[in-house]
Image (tube, grey):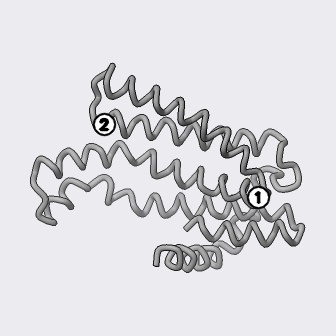
Amino acid sequence: MASALETLCGQAFGAKRYHMLGTYMQRSWIVLFCCCILLLPVYIFASPILKLMGQSDDVAEQSGVVALWLIPLQFSYAFQFPLQRFLQSQLKNLVTLWFSLAVLVLHAVTSWVLVYELDFGVAGVAMALDISWWVWGIGLFWYVSSGRCPQSWAGFSMQAFSGLWEFVKFSAASGVMRWY
């Protein structure tokens, strides 16, 4: 659903309505975080759902454990993807590249430590993903909020809460179009 942000931010940037980029990103955060909350029961009850679908108990139980560890990852996607689209629409792709490379190194080290040194197994992989994606999102947000996007980010705004339903409809249509 973050794909709607590509269109809206691209249009706002092209029309030199830079202040709208930050507003659109905040709307996207609101919508995506609400979607994450709506999806929480699927993650929380993954084991029973998989058992109802006929999956073996061992696989369902292990999948349920991993699903619980992936809840923070789901929320990090909702935070990080809009930041990527926000920066991409302003042609700041190198920022995302450098943060990606730094997080790749962090992820490799974190995965090694959690899986092999601390012997957390598959749950360690999920934990490493959680850590890496949140560090990436926080790093991108630090870049945006530290004054490097002065025209497009003026801080949080109540304006982000207006026009949410239209944004939801556009996001859903974009998501379906991209998925299909």
- Find residue 65 and report its horizontal and vertical position in percent: 26, 43
Q: Which residue is drawn at 33% across and 54% down?
A: 43
Task: Read off the residue under disc 2.
Answer: 123
Q: Is residue 35 left or right of residue 158?
A: left
**What crowding class fits label 2: few (fewer than 14 Cα within 10 Å), some (14-19), or many (20 or more)?**
many
Q: Which residue is drawn at 17% across and 52% down?
A: 60
Question: Residue 49's quadrant in the figure?
Answer: bottom left
What kind of residue is marked 2?
Answer: Ala
Picture layout, residue 15 above or below residue 80: below
Q: In this view, does 2 lie to the left or right of 158?
A: left
Q: Residue at x 54, y 40 (%)?
A: 134
Q: Which residue is drawn at 73% across and 45% down?
A: 94
What kind of residue is marked 1?
Answer: Gly
Q: Nearer the viewer, mark 1 or mark 2?
A: 2
- Find residue 101 and report its horizontal and vertical position in percent: 60, 37
Picture layout, residue 120 above or below residue 9: above
Q: Is mark 1 on a helix, strand or loop?
A: helix
Cα distance in 3D space between marks 1 and 2? 35 Å
- Comparing 71 with 103, the one in front is 103
Picture layout, residue 178 above or below residue 39: below
Q: Is residue 36 left or right of residue 167?
A: left
Q: Look at the numbered discs 1 and 2 and tell me whether their residues touch, using CB distance below 8 Å.
A: no
Task: Read off the residue under disc 1.
Answer: 22
Question: Residue 151's quadrant in the figure?
Answer: bottom right
**What crowding class fits label 1: few (fewer than 14 Cα within 10 Å), some (14-19), or many (20 or more)?**
many
- Comparing 171 with 157, the one in front is 171
Question: Residue 69's quadrant in the figure?
Answer: top left
